[in-house]
Amino acid sequence: MSAHAAVSPAPSLAERFAFWWLLLVVVQQAQRVFLIGAAALRDVPSPAVLGLTLVTGLRADLVTASFGMLAALAVALVVAAPVTLRGRSRARAALVRTLGVAAAVLTVAYVAVLTIDMGYYLYSGQRLDAVFMEYVTDLLGQGRHGEVAGSQVGAQTAAELSEVGTWAVRVLSYAALMTAAIVGWRLVFRRGLAGALAARPRATALALPLAVAVGAWGVHPGGPDSVQSAPIASSTYYALAQSPIWIVKMAVETSGKRAVIPPAVQAAMPEARAIPLAREILAPGARFVSPRYPLVHVEEPRLSPLARRPNVLVLFLEALDRRFVGRTIAGRRVTPFLDAIVADSVSFEHFHANGAQTFHGLFASLCSSLPRQGTAATKARYANDYLCLPTLLTRGGYRTRMVIGQNRDRSHSRLGLFMARNGLEELIDEAAFPRSAPRMGLGVADGALLDRVRTEIDALRGGGRPYFLAALTTGTHHPFAVPTTHPDVAALRAEPDRYVAALRYLDLELERFFTGLRRDGALRDTVVLLLGDHGRHERVGRTDLENEAGHFTVPLAVWLDPSLRAPSIYRPRVVSGVASQLDLTPTILGLAGLTPRLSSFAGRDVSCALAADCLPERAVYLSEVYDNGAGIADGEGFWFYGFASRSLEHADLALRTPPRRWPAGDPAAAARVERILALYVTANALIEQNTLWSWREFGERL
């Protein structure tokens, strides 16, 4: 054999691209397998969940590998372009070499990110997020000023590095797996795939671009975001199916969605003035412990008033507006069951949603945090640090689940990512329902949704631990598509407002649901909270102000099973004070005896109201979405301030009297405007700066 014949031909552009493209997939899958092995030590997945996690993760890896290699190819084309003047063959050779170098650099970067993500996950249980990036920023910033040694960041880093034995085993195991994956792929490619690509250059030239395009699109009609729509109920394995490389995509995605505080508002209410005012409004007399996280304050844990730790069932009823509860329309009672359950509950006459859309309401309810203007924090800032109810209940021994009738990432809501980061063990969405389940309007019909909630209750009751279970209905959302088999629903469909027929259907399904649970004793030791996620979106009021206030007029009923009742702790009645969704998390934690020593909560524990009139005078924040402004509700009514009009509007809490308006400069309006602006600036600034809460700073102090 001649020396010339022994030399292997140089790889083609297609061969080199395919090698590095699939190598990026291999290293990402190897890291995922390693993390799954670590997670399985504490939470063993079923074969179905494991398979779906790996398949979904493979699709995520194809997306990141495809876009990464397309970027490398673009760099190679730019670098090799000048060589075209020296001939096509030289240009082609330069392109192949440059692509190899660019792809190698890209692979090193990917492996570095994957390795950091591995370490962060083993330490915190989270994938790479904004919190980690802040940690790095703090470390670098303090390093430049020589302040690391005495800082909290330095102490934390030193403590981690001191665990040499533990980390050495982890790192060596990870390195061995990653090395085996890379070497194995190189052998497979050289001995098989490279020859097949070289033998069929025309087929390769057609098939490879198509394969890369399909991979970049996530091998799914829904595109790359379909990975975040994956029907993996377990939050642990849902998170492991995602790609840490998307931290860059997340930064780009959220950068254009900042809740910009209007310059006029900033001038009228600078942050340095807003924070002290917000502290006094939200937690008067509290001891605040951090200038960087200005709402973190000392709580006063007290014993639960209940004899034992309760199960908690929270039903968020879509757009449940208290103005429509208890009404008779066209001779038919619209909510007879809700009326009865409210009569047997502690209900709040002046309860309010804090946001005008579902995800603002969920954020306020589950994290007791002021909603931001515009896109909800659950979507726009889901990678921030928050102190939320599911996390604290999970740490307290609760099982935590949520059932929704839509896909978790409908309209790119990022609910799955947010809930996985904030303690929810399982999020059961539309994909978990059988194909035979009726689907109408936004998703699964409310009757089928409540049937699945019942299934979850039965399973959780057999687990020997208290549980938290939340659900979100959809039927009372436009287009109000519900079954019309009941004569009341059919008759109310003739009404111009289709909401009332949908509300009647929901009431019937709630009655069926509760009747079965109570008949079977399935609500023993259970606290049930029924509330609206927000009020009506449709214009049903007589004035613009009434329509605006209607976004927030939701009911709350707190019902205790008789097994938990005692005259000294529970007295069904109507509570007259002002309360809001911000109070849900502190109240549930108070009933469970799990109030943390520190919190960032903007609400208060109102469990004392189960037996006595105890609510203090206060104002609750109302975050607008549809109008450029904000508001508050207090004992004297609704107050909305428009940033463009620079005027304050007022109506009573019952929305019976005609609204009044004052210019912002009017002394009669000044105090309310100041409060509204202080809460608005605080809400938006702290979310944007990720300074609501820090597990790194305060986690060990809970």
Image (cartoon, rainbow, N blue to C red):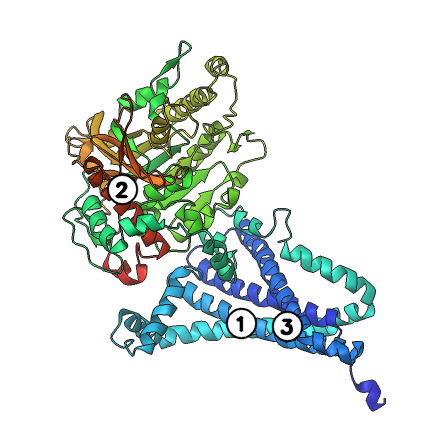
* Three-letter code, disc 2: Ile
Residue 570, placed above or below residue 355: above
Q: Which mark is residue 676?
A: 2
Answer left or right for 594 relative to 463.
left
Residue 571: assigned label: none
Proximity of marks 3 and 1: CB atoms separated by less than 8 Å = no
Q: Quadrant of residue 3?
A: bottom right
What separation in Å lies between label 3 and label 1 (alpha carbons)?
20 Å
Q: Is residue 10 visible?
A: no
The residue that disc 3 covers is: 184
First of labels 3, 1 by sequence position: 1
In three-dimensional space, the C-alpha distance between marks 2 and 1, rounded to whole angstroms, equals 46 Å
Q: At 36% from the left edge and 73% from the top edge, which residue is drawn?
A: 140
Q: Which residue occupies the foreground of this view, 67 or 436?
A: 67
Q: Please, which residue is most extreme toward the bottom here?
A: 3
* Residue closest to the eye, 105 or 674: 674
Residue type pointed to by label 3: Gly
